[in-house]
Structure formats: structure tokens, C-alpha cells
Image (cartoon, coloured by chain):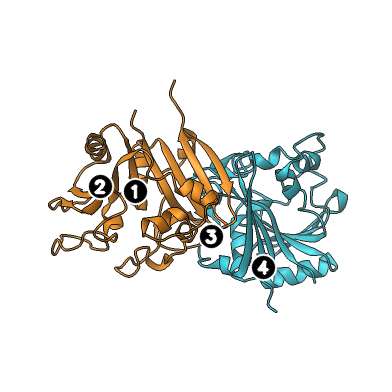
Chain colours: A cyan, B orange
Amino acid sequence: MSRVRVHNFAVSLDGYSTGEGQSLEAPFGHAGGRLMDWFFHTRTFRGMHGEDGGGTGVDEALAGTWADGIGAEIMGRNKFGPQRGPWENHDWTGWWGPDPVFHTPVFVLTHHPRPSVEMEGGTTFHFIDATPEEALRQAREAANGLDVRIGGGPTTVRQFLAADLIDRMHIVVVPIVLGRGERLWDGLEGIEQRFRIESVTTPSGVTHMIFERNREE
Amino acid sequence: MSRVRVHNFAVSLDGYSTGEGQSLEAPFGHAGGRLMDWFFHTRTFRGMHGEDGGGTGVDEALAGTWADGIGAEIMGRNKFGPQRGPWENHDWTGWWGPDPVFHTPVFVLTHHPRPSVEMEGGTTFHFIDATPEEALRQAREAANGLDVRIGGGPTTVRQFLAADLIDRMHIVVVPIVLGRGERLWDGLEGIEQRFRIESVTTPSGVTHMIFERNREE
């Protein structure tokens, strides 16, 4: 059965998964690179950007599983770009250059659909105005039996958690207090009861938490 | 130099250190025992209550340091009891029975001072209406050169952090989403920059974080 997975999703001690004031220069707003610093040093991240090297320890072991068996991604519009409201034009095709890192269909949730964009390397962005359930139906169809990744940002992950659609979630608790931005956990009281949780800390200072959904048997 | 320390202070994934609705039956409100479950199983906790046994692993190694070298505690009134506003009488002497676990002077921060209460075993409760700085001055004097523990709850720890008075802090991140209650980190954006932080996870599922204040040298 195709599973729904979250990977490499960072959250601060005070529960924020992105900062305030997203812009073209600051995809994570005032958080800057602080939430993802552990990731920037991994071989996986460097490889995504055509660079050699990078850590091969526990951070890498966990980061590196993000693409295995994934056939489609669903992301929120704020992960796709800093624009809000109706699109002024269709020039923006994401932060990831002409050959994005996804290499699968990517469904961007937006109240302002626009034509699909086929990029190099197998990534196609589809823009849909849909509930989590409907978006997942479309992504599953596109994934051809493979898993679907919920790529973020926090609003999107939160909506999929609230709808009880997530099977496996890799959360990375980063020991910083962001103070403002967008919270991951709001409205999810007791969500941990749906999961078995394993945690491990690494020398980068973060705590990885793997949430595996309890099986109903 | 006498240091100011926080120990065994639990916080949920969404940043709450106590639940909503504290009462005589529910010192942590709707959180119940969930924030402290890792602690209840330690030898230290059981020993506090005259019981044998309890875990002797990493949770215990960290929990067990709470009293070493401590000469006084400062706590908020909500840690002392569930009453609010003026005292109706002075019958309430805390949750800890006739011989409280502290065995030192304890300064209870309250806008409603009342006479000190000398308990068995060396614990004396003093009730003071004071700023963090003034409370610390009094506690240091009573501690006779030993360290001062900031005992909680979240408002008290937050106030002492905001006033930059804490030297060492043992925070325990518990993988639950409480949803409501009292937040620890509000107003403390960037607080991590004052500390070196080490983290370790344990089989109980929690992540212990030790914050050691950067030395100004």
C-alpha cells in the first residue's frame, strides 16, 4: 500500500517550522538557515545541488531516505514560492532551478490554480485547489503505486496530520527558540497517540523523531 | 560562585510545561502525569517518596543531580499550590506533605505574602513578592554559598530566563502535543545563543537537553 510520508521536517523548541517574513531572499523568513543547518551539511543536500562531500553520519542516514520509493510530492504554495494571492505572471517556477530536486510530479496546493509546468529531470508542478483528501487522491494516482511525500510547509503538514492522512513522519527538533513564524502543532493536541515514536540525537545538536503510525489490526 | 540551576523541567513538543486547569487533584492540569512520566520511574523520584526501586539508567543519572549542591529553591506560586488570589487561610503547605522533598529554604513568589512556614526535614517556605533579581538575592543569602534552584513552573522559569539569571538548565522534551496550558518559551526568541546545549535521548522516549551558559571571559 502506498504510504504518505514527511521527511526532514524541522521544528524549533517553541514549535515553529518556519520564521516570519518569507521573501525571495529568505525562504524561511527570519529563521534564515537555522532550522536546516543540520541538513545543509549532509551528503544528500550537497548532492541535490551538484556538490561533492557532506556528512555521512546519522543526520545523513536519516536525510537520505527522503526520495526512496517516492512517486509524488504534495507541497503548500508557501513552500513553492514567496508570492501571495493571484499570480501576477507564471514566470516563477520554484526555488529549485530548471532541474528541481524532486524528479516526480509535485502537487502545489493553492487557491489560484495555473497551468502545469514541466521542468527538466522529471519534475512537473501541478497547481490544484483541493482538500488534503482530494490532493492525496490525485498524487497517489500520479505516483503509480509509490509513496507520496508531504513536503511542507507547516500549514500543509498540519492539515494532513489533522486529516489523519500521514503514515510516517520524520521531525527534526532544532534547539533554537524562533519566537515567531508558523507553528506546526497548533490544533493537534494528542496527535502522538496515533504514532509510535523513536528519537535520536546527533552531534549536530538536533533530535530526529520518527513517527510511525500505529497499525489498526 | 553560586550558580542558578533548573532541573527536570519538562516541555511538550508544542512548548507547554504544564496543562490547562490546575486543581488539587491535577497539579499539571489536563497534562496529568504525561510530562513527568519519565521522572516517576526514576530511583530519585521513588526515593523522594520513601519508595524503593526505580530506574537507574540515563533518566536517573540526569534526574539525580537535582539536589547536589543546592542551598535554596525559588518557585512560583502555581508550583506551590492551586490557589489563586488572596489566601483564604494558611492551611495549605504545598503538595509535598509534612516533610517536603526540598530540605532547604524555599522562596515562593506570590503577590500575597504570608508568614513563613517551617516544615519537617529542613524545608522552610518563605512567601515573597519580589522581582527575579530580588528573589535571587534573598535565596542566595539563604543558600549560604550553595547553588539556587529555580523550581518552576513555566512562568517562573521564563521570567528568570528573560532576566538572564540562569546558568544551567536541564530541559526534558517529551514527545507529546499538549495543545493548551502554559508555554515555556514565549518571549524568549534567540535564548539559545546564551548557552551551549547538549542533548541525549533515552529509552523512555524523552530528550534531555542541558543548557550551560556561555562564560563571558
Q: Is residue A75 visible?
A: yes
Q: How many marks?
A: 4
Which label lies toward us, 2 or 4?
Answer: 2
Q: CA distance from mark 1 to mark 3?
A: 27 Å
Identify residue type, mark 3.
Trp
Rendered image: mark on residue B151: 1
The chain letter under disc 4 is A
Question: Could you say which is closer to the camera, residue A171 or residue B187?
Answer: A171
Identify the element where label 1 is drawn: strand
Q: Are marks 1 and 2 in contact (CB under 8 Å)?
A: yes
Q: CA distance from mark 1 to mark 4?
A: 36 Å
Identify the element where label 3 is drawn: loop
Q: Which residue is mark 2?
A: B106
Q: Relative to A83, is B213 on the left or the right?
A: left
Identify the element where label 4 is drawn: strand
At label 1, counting other C-alpha atoms closer than 10 Å, the crowd grade (few under 14, some 14-19, many 20 or more) is many
**Residue B146 in the image: above or below residue B90:** above
Identify residue type, mark 4.
Arg
Q: Which residue is mark 4?
A: A213
Q: Which residue is mark 3?
A: A185
Residue B162 placement: quadrant: top left
